[in-house]
C-alpha cells in the first residue's frame, strides 16, 4: 500500500536526538514524576496518561497545565502530584505559555543565564483547551518552531465543568449541553474535528505527530520519548476514556480504550516527516456498536444512528488507508 | 557616556528595553505601540539586542508568552494599545497574581467603537485594578526612564509585580523629543539582573498557580494587595536612586509645576499635562494663579501624597482622558480616585472634572484657558451647580 502523506511542503528534514526507547513494560523506569497526591476520579484515564507521560519524559521536564480536569483535580488545595516544575495556564493559552517558556530557555542558555540542559517543555491540555478555546495558541506554538511538545489528552468533553460538549465529543454522545430530546434525538449531531490532521496539514515546522491511547502504555511512552527527541514542535493526541463523563464503571477504562482502537473509533498512528505510519491495525475491525454498548452516553442511540457513526468511522479509516470491509452504507435520512 | 538623541516615545521605549537587556520579547501589531516593536525587531535582527523575538498570534498570546518566559526566569517585554489591551485582559490577573514581573507598555488608544486611532487612556485604565503597576509618561524621556524604573521596581523582591508603563498614543509615542540615552554603566548600577526566587527550573521544582480552597483564596489576594502596598513604599527610594544615577529630578509620585503660589491646579497624567504647563505660565499674565500637578503613578495610587498636595489649593481641575460610563458624578476613574483621596484630607478643594482628549481629540491651549477661567469661577462661587464637563460639548458654567 502506498504510504499516505500528510502535511504541507516541509523543506527541513526531521532531526531526532538519541533517545532510549522502552522495550517492554518490564523496562519502564521506576522513578515516578507524577505521584500520588491528587484527587482525580476513580478510574481516571487522563491521570494515567499524565503519569505515563511524566514517566517517559523524566526529571528534566517542565509541564504547563491549562485549566481542565488535569488542573483542577490535580492541584486542589495548593498541592500537586508533580515532582517536576508545573505551571497553570488559562484554558485559552497553553500553547502560548509553553512558547514563552521555550523562548526563555533558548535565550537564557544562549546568554549564559541558565547553565542546565534545555528541558522537555510539555503542555498537557484537554480537548477543549486544544481543539476549541485553545486552538489559536496551539497553532501559534506549532507554527513558530519552538522546541516543545503539545499533548492533548482527549476525554472527549469539557469534563471538569460537568461534562459539556467539545469539538472532540463523538457524534451521538450525550453531554449536559447535548441532551437527547424530541427535537435532537441523536444528542450531539456533529462529528468531531480531526485535530491531529489539522495540526499536521497546516504547520510546516511540525515534523512529528502521534496519536496514542492510555490503553497502549508502551506505545504512548515511546511516542512521548520520540516526540521529545525530535527537534522543534511536536504534537500528541492521547485518547483517555473518562468513566464519569462517558458513564462506565471505573475499572473498565483500559478495556474501553482498547475497544476504541479495535472498532476504529480511535486509531493509533504517527506522522514522521509527513509519512503516516499506523501502529495498531486489528486483523478484523469490530463493529462500532460494540464500543457504543459499553457507555451510558450512547444509550439513547438507535440502530440508524449507530450506523451513521459506523459510516463516519469507515470513512475515517479509509482516509488512513485502513479500508474496512465491506464499507457501511450511509443510512437514509429518517422519514 | 550618555548621549542625547531626538526620538519619539515609541522608539525611546525600545531603546530602554535594549538597555535593560531583555531576554524575550513578544510582538503583535496594533497602532500606535507598534513603533516600539518595529524598532525592537530591527535591533534583534541587527544583533544590537540579544533576545528571542516571538511573533505572538494576538495580544492574548503576547501576554501568555511573556508570562511563560518570565516564569522560566527571563526578563521580558511586550506591549499593546487600545482593543489589544482589552483582548489580552484575561492574562492580567494571572500574571500579577502569580508575581511575574512582566513589562507591558501601553501606547494608549481609544477603544472601539468607532474604529479610531486616537489616543485616550481608557484602554489602560480599564485594567487598573488587576494588580499591575501603572503610570504615564509626559515626554519621550520619561517614557525611556519609566521602562527602566518599572523593571527595577517590578523586579524588586519586595514587589514582584508586572508593570504597565503608559504613554499617550501619538502625543508621546510619535512626537519626537530630546532623550538622553543611558550608558551601560548607569544601567548596570541601577538595574540588577533579574533572578527570581521561584522559576520553572527542573533542578528545583515549583508549582505555579495551583487551585486552592475558598478559604485560601483571600489570603492569596491579601498577598497581592500587600505587594502593591510595598511597591508604594519602595517607589521613593527607587526614584531617588534613579535620580542619583541618571542625574534626573523626578518626584516619586507627583510632579508639580508652578504650584507654589497657585490657587488652582490642573491634575492629570501623561501628555496633556504638558500644554497645561504652558497654559499655567501664560495665565499668570491674566492674574490667574494656575499650577499643574502631574500624577506619575496611577497604581499604586499615592493616596496620602494626593490628599496632602491637593488640599493646598482652592480648586482642582481633573483632566479626565478616559471614560468610565456611569461612574461617580458621571466623571471618570481619575476623578473618582482624587475625590476618594480627598475625603480624609486636611482640607477639601473644589474638584472639577474635564472629560477631554477622548478619541484622540486635541485639547487646545484655548481649552486650558477656558478650563482655568471655570476653575476661577468655581473658586469664587459659594456653591457649584455643575462640576463635570465634556470639553467642547457644553459651556463650562460652574455656578
Image (cartoon, helix red, strand yellow):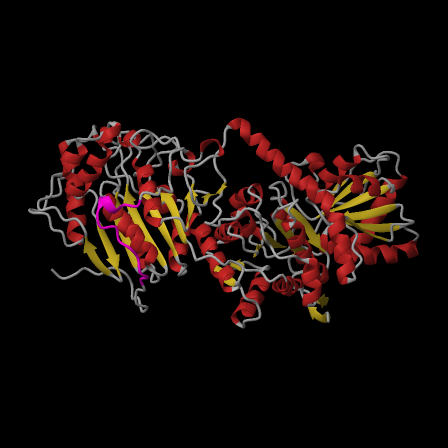
* Closer-to-camera residue (A183/A255): A255
**Image point (83%, 40%), residue name:** B308
Left or right position of A240 against B377: left
Give above or below for A166 relative to A149: above
Residue B166: image location, x then y, percent: 65, 53
* Closer-to-camera residue (B176/A290): A290
Residue A159: image location, x then y, percent: 35, 34
Residue A189: image location, x then y, percent: 25, 38
Which quarter of the rendering shows the C terminus of chain B? top right
Question: Is A26 part of what is drawn in magenta?
Answer: yes
Q: Can residue B332 be seen in this view?
A: no
* Closer-to-camera residue (A292/A311): A292
* Closer-to-camera residue (A47/B24): A47
Left or right position of A97 against B314: left
Q: What stretch is highlighted in magenta?
A: A16-29
Give above or below for B106 relative to B37: above
Which quadrant of the structure image shows residue B334?
top right
Residue A60: image location, x then y, percent: 41, 51
**Image point (22%, 52%), residue name:** A269
Question: Is B323 part of what is drawn in magenta?
Answer: no
Amino acid at each position: 500500500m502506498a504510504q499516505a502523506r500528510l502535511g504541507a511542503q516541509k523543506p527541513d528534514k526531521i532531526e531526532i536526538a538519541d533517545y532510549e526507547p522502552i522495550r517492554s513494560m518490564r523496562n519502564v523506569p521506576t522513578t515516578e514524576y507524577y505521584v500520588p497526591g491528587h484527587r482525580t476520579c476513580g478510574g481516571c484515564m487522563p491521570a494515567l496518561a499524565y503519569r505515563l507521560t511524566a514517566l517517559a519524559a523524566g526529571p528534566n521536564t517542565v509541564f504547563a497545565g491549562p485549566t481542565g480536569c488535569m488542573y483542577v483535580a490535580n492541584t486542589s488545595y495548593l498541592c500537586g502530584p508533580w515532582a517536576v516544575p508545573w505551571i497553570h495556564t488559562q484554558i485559552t493559552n497553553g500553547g502560548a505559555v509553553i512558547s514563552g517558556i521555550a523562548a526563555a530557555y533558548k535565550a537564557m542558555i544562549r546568554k549564559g543565564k541558565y547553565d542546565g540542559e534545555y528541558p522537555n517543555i510539555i503542555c498537557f491540555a484537554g480537548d477543549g483547551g486544544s481543539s476549541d478555546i485553545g486552538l489559536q495558541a496551539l497553532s501559534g506554538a506549532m507554527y513558530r518552531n519552538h522546541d516543545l511538545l503539545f499533548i492533548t489528552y482527549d476525554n472527549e468533553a469539557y469534563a471538569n465543568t460537568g461534562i459539556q460538549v467539545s469539538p472532540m465529543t463523538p457524534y451521538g454522545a450525550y453531554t449536559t449541553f447535548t441532551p437527547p430530546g424530541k427535537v435532537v434525538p441523536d444528542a450531539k449531531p456533529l462529528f468531531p474535528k480531526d485535530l491531529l490532521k489539522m495540526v499536521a496539514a497546516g504547520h510546516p515546522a511540525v515534523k512529528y505527530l502521534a496519536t496514542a491511547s492510555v490503553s497502549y502504555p508502551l506505545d504512548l511512552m515511546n511516542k512521548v520519548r520520540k516526540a521529545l527527541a525530535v527537534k522543534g514542535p511536536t504534537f500528541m493526541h492521547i485518547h483517555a476514556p473518562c468513566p464519569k463523563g462517558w458513564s462506565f464503571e471505573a475499572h473498565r477504562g483500559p478495556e474501553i480504550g482498547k475497544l476504541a482502537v479495535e472498532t476504529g473509533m480511535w486509531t493509533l498512528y504517527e506522522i514522521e516527516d509527513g509519512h503516516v505510519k499506523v501502529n495498531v491495525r486489528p486483523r478484523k475491525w469490530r463493529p462500532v456498536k460494540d464500543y457504543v454498548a459499553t457507555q451510558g452516553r450512547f444509550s439513547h442511540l438507535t440502530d440508524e444512528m449507530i450506523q451513521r457513526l459506523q459510516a463516519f468511522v469507515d470513512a475515517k479509516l479509509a482516509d488512513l488507508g485502513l479500508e474496512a470491509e465491506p464499507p457501511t452504507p450511509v443510512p437514509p435520512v429518517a422519514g | 557616556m550618555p548621549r542625547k538623541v531626538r526620538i519619539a516615545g515609541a522608539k525611546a521605549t525600545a531603546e530602554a528595553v535594549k538597555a535593560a537587556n531583555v531576554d524575550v520579547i513578544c510582538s503583535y501589531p496594533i497602532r500606535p505601540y507598534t513603533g516600539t516593536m518595529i524598532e525592537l525587531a530591527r535591533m534583534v535582527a541587527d544583533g544590537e539586542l540579544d533576545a528571542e523575538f516571538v511573533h505572538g498570534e494576538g495580544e492574548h498570546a503576547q501576554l501568555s508568552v511573556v508570562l511563560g518566559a518570565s516564569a522560566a526566569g527571563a526578563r521580558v517585554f511586550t506591549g499593546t494599545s487600545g482593543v489589544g489591551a482589552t483582548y489580552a485582559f484575561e492574562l492580567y490577573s494571572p500574571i500579577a497574581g502569580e508575581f511575574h514581573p512582566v513589562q507591558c507598555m501601553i501606547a494608549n488608544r481609544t477603544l472601539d467603537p468607532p474604529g479610531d486611532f486616537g489616543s485616550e487612556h481608557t484602554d489602560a485604565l480599564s485594567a487598573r485594578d488587576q494588580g499591575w503597576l501603572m503610570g504615564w509618561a509626559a515626554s519621550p524621556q520619561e517614557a525611556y526612564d519609566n521602562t527602566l524604573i518599572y523593571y527595577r521596581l517590578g523586579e524588586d523582591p519586595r514587589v514582584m509585580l508586572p508593570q504597565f508603563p503608559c504613554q499617550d498614543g501619538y502625543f508621546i509615542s510619535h512626537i519626537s523629543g530630546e532623550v538622553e540615552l543611558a550608558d551601560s554603566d548607569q544601567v548596570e548600577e541601577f538595574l540588577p539582573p533579574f533572578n527570581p526566587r521561584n522559576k520553572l527550573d527542573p533542578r528545583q521544582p515549583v508549582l505555579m498557580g495551583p487551585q486552592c480552597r475558598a478559604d485560601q483564596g483571600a489570603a492569596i489576594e491579601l498577598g497581592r494587595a500587600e505587594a502593591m502596598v510595598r511597591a508604594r513604599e519602595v517607589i521613593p527610594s527607587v526614584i531617588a536612586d534613579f535620580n542619583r544615577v541618571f542625574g534626573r529630578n523626578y518626584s516619586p509620585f507627583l510632579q508639580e509645576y508652578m504650584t507654589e503660589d497657585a490657587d488652582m491646579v490642573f491634575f492629570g497624567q501623561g501628555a496633556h499635562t504638558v500644554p497645561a504647563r504652558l497654559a499655567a505660565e501664560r495665565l499668570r499674565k491674566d492674574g490667574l494663579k494656575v499650577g499643574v500637578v502631574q500624577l506619575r503613578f496611577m497604581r499604586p495610587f499615592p493616596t496620602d501624597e494626593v490628599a496632602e498636595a491637593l488640599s493646598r489649593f482652592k480648586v482642582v481641575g481633573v483632566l479626565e482622558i478616559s471614560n468610565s460610563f456611569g461612574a461617580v458624578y458621571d466623571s471618570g476613574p481619575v476623578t473618582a480616585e482624587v475625590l476618594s483621596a480627598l475625603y480624609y484630607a486636611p482640607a477639601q478643594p473644589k474638584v472639577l472634572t474635564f472629560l477631554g482628549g477622548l478619541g484622540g481629540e486635541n485639547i487646545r491651549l484655548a481649552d486650558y484657558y477656558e478650563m482655568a477661567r471655570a476653575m476661577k469661577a468655581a473658586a469664587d462661587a459659594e456653591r457649584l451647580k455643575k462640576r463635570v464637563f465634556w470639553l467642547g460639548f457644553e459651556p463650562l458654567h460652574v455656578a
